[in-house]
Amino acid sequence: MEEQDYKTPKALMAAVIGMGVLIIVGVVVLVGVVIHRMNAPAHPAIASTVPLTDARTAHLALGPDEHVQTMTRVHDDLLAIQIAGHGPGRIMLWNVATGQVQPGLETTAP
């Protein structure tokens, strides 16, 4: 038997060469963009026009053996703070918007 010569279609060769050229062009463009961004001057960060915090501070009167155990959000600006210690626990309400701490509940262990 005689072997037949297989010829690659010209369209397939053109597609392979075209894709190779596109890969090379893409890599060159990517390297160019990276080099351009590395050499560009740094842009300063835009300053926020809205203050992130208020100057109000809340002071929580804790005994020497008490500590804040958990904080839970109740409403948008209201936090419930559970205070634990050697005595009965307490729950205080902290209004974040006004900075006021309101007395809440006293809890006792069963």
Image (spheres, helix red, strand yellow):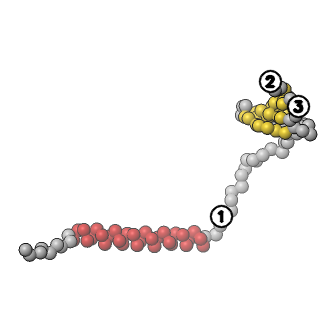
Answer with the quarter of the image where residue 77 lies: top right
Answer with the quarter of the image where residue 16 lies: bottom left
Residue type at mark 3: give it. Gly
Query: What is the distance, in whole Å, between disc 1 and disc 2 at their CAs?
Result: 61 Å
Dot 1 or dot 2, earlier in sequence: 1
Label 2 sits on residue: 110
- Crowding near the residue tagged with mark 1, few <14, some 14–19, many ≥20 C-alpha atoms within 10 Å: few
Question: Toward the viewer: 105 or 64?
Answer: 64
Q: Give me the residue at 79% from left, 38% from top.
A: 69
Question: Toward the viewer: 54 or 62?
Answer: 62
Q: Position of residue 49 (x, y in %)?
A: 72, 50
Residue type at mark 1: give it. His
Dot 2 or dot 3, earlier in sequence: 3
SS at circle 2: loop
Q: Position of residue 103 (x, y in %)?
A: 86, 29
Query: What is the distance, in whole Å, between disc 2 and disc 3 at their CAs?
Result: 13 Å
Residue 105 seen in render: no
Answer with the quarter of the image where residue 64 lies: top right
Residue 43 numbered mark, or none: 1
- Crowding near the residue tagged with mark 3, few <14, some 14–19, many ≥20 C-alpha atoms within 10 Å: few
Task: Give the farthest residue toward the left.
Answer: 1
Q: Give me the residue at 31% from left, 72% from top.
A: 17
* Tags 2 and 3 touching, CB below 8 Å: no
Drawn side of residue 77 relative to residue 37, left or right: right
Drawn side of residue 75 relative to residue 33, left or right: right
Question: Toward the viewer: 49 or 36?
Answer: 36
Q: Position of residue 68 (x, y in %)?
A: 82, 38
Residue type at mark 2: give it. Pro
Which image quadrant: the C terminus?
top right
Residue 56 seen in render: yes
Label 3 sits on residue: 87
Drawn side of residue 71 relative to residue 60, left or right: left
